[in-house]
Image (cartoon, rainbow, N blue to C red):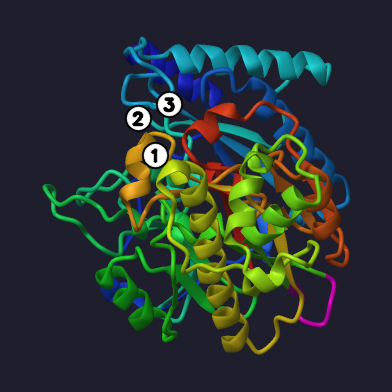
Amino acid sequence: MKKLIIATLLLCSVNLLAQVKITDADIKKISLFNQTDKPTHLVVSWLENNGQLIDELYSLVLDYNKTATKEDQISLVVSIPLNYGAESMFSDEMRPDGEPYADAKKQYAKLQAKYKTKKALPNLQFFNSTEPQNPWMQDYGDVLEVELKDGSKKTVFMDTNYYGSTDGSKAVNELAKLLKLPVYNPNNYAVDELPNDGDRGGNLEVTQENLMYVGNTISDKLSAKLQKLSGVKPITLDTQFLVVGHIDEIMSVVPAKNKCGAALVYADPVYAINLAFLGKTGKSAINNYLPNMTYFLKKASLSKKAPYTIADFDLTKQVRDDEIVGDTEVLNMLQAAVSIKKNVDTVVANSKCLEQVIGLPVHMVGNPELGEDAFELTTRNLVPLSSPVNLVALGNTLILKEPLFKEQVIAELSKISGSKVHIIKANMTSYEMGFGAFHCATQVIRKRK
């Protein structure tokens, strides 16, 4: 262990000063950063076989910096876990401490060779999270702008108690040390109190107008705290139909060169269903459910041709015993589409300027880990496969995991004025196994425009 720590300190320029903590007593007001704010750091976790992704993201960072001013340069920050242990969903056995560090060190050498230097690579930092590998950097916390009672403003990392306890996550504290950010813990869980999975960073989002929107899996405790400290009541949206239950799985506000400065993109299962009817499903297996989709069409709609709207389907029809899997799959998607549309309408109605709203085709499936038991659940039972909505904006570049309906997704996102679409080429199968995509996998530190 001692050798690991020494080696890590040689690789990382970690701030060794005592961690600064912000408490409720220090705070006058808070606001969350949003995707239209300027990025300063893109943070991602190291996983097994993660070198290709790190290489690709580093290249994206360097490309971004080519056109950015010196003050607006960004860095890639990589969290190095203690081990690839059995606590991870990607390994069945405990692996030795220090193995991830050794792998990351080899990748660093490969990058040095690629860029033909033996010097330290610019805009690339590592830190030791001292925890087993965890891909979901987004859920560790969120970044706040905090106005303190002394009148000063600080960028603060909000610890959302990923693991629970009064100390929160070690990764949060180590990342905050590296970036010299204070840490704020809004819930202060007791040591034996389990954290609420709806309180995590992927479920806490905000529009370009500082309009906070959250999924209804959030705890009353955190929702009340955010309202008290921000002065803005969070808009609570339905995410109870999702296994993970986070709003970033189905909705995102991204930069746009329009009068609002932003656009809203959302997951649209009906769009995906229409692609099946039109024979344009690509790699998706959704076309296997065409007979079931036809079953749910209203009689008056059977004579029509796709594309259909949600009004063309009869959601009151009973699932057939001999088609329980297919009928349930389609009915779940249709019901999810109704909930998502209500969510979108709610956010738009509460916004002063959010006119461009774009649906992206998404195939939703029952939780594959539960098998047929998933069909007996009425809540927390759906997974959006490779959700293209779960994306990250670095300036006007929208970065996302390769979606199932790639051609249509790119076409829709290209309608956003000024946007550039980057589809991750690196293998992200590990993330899909955990029901997450690119936004779930990252944390972006930002500053105001």
- Amino acid type at circle 1 is Ala
User: Which segment is the magenta one?
Assistant: 257-262
What predominant SS class does the magenta segment belong to?
A: loop
Give the quadrant of the N terminus: top left
- Amino acid type at circle 3 is Pro
Q: Quadrant of residue 401?
A: top right
Residue closest to the eye, 287 or 361: 287
Query: Contact (CB < 8 A) between labels 2 and 1?
Result: yes
Residue 287 lies, in percent from the top left, at: 68, 42
- Amino acid type at circle 2 is Glu
Location of mark 1 (residue):
171
Residue 261 lies, in percent from the top left, at: 77, 75
SS state under label 2:
loop
Residue in the image at 35% along x and 63% along y: 217
Sort mark 2 into few (<14), some (14-19) or many (20+) by Cα contacts within 10 Å.
Answer: some
Tell me if residue 324 comes above or below residue 119 in the rendering: below
Question: In whole angstroms, how far apart are the C-alphas of marks 2 and 1?
Answer: 7 Å
Location of mark 3 (residue):
81
Location of mark 2 (residue):
131
Question: In whole angstroms, how far apart are the C-alphas of marks 2 and 3?
Answer: 5 Å
In the displayed structure image, the side of residue 19 where residue 259 appears, left or right: right
SS state under label 3:
loop
Q: Quadrant of residue 200?
A: bottom left
Mark 2 or 3, nearer chain start? 3
Q: Is residue 99 magenta?
A: no
Residue in the image at 43% along x and 54% along y: 319
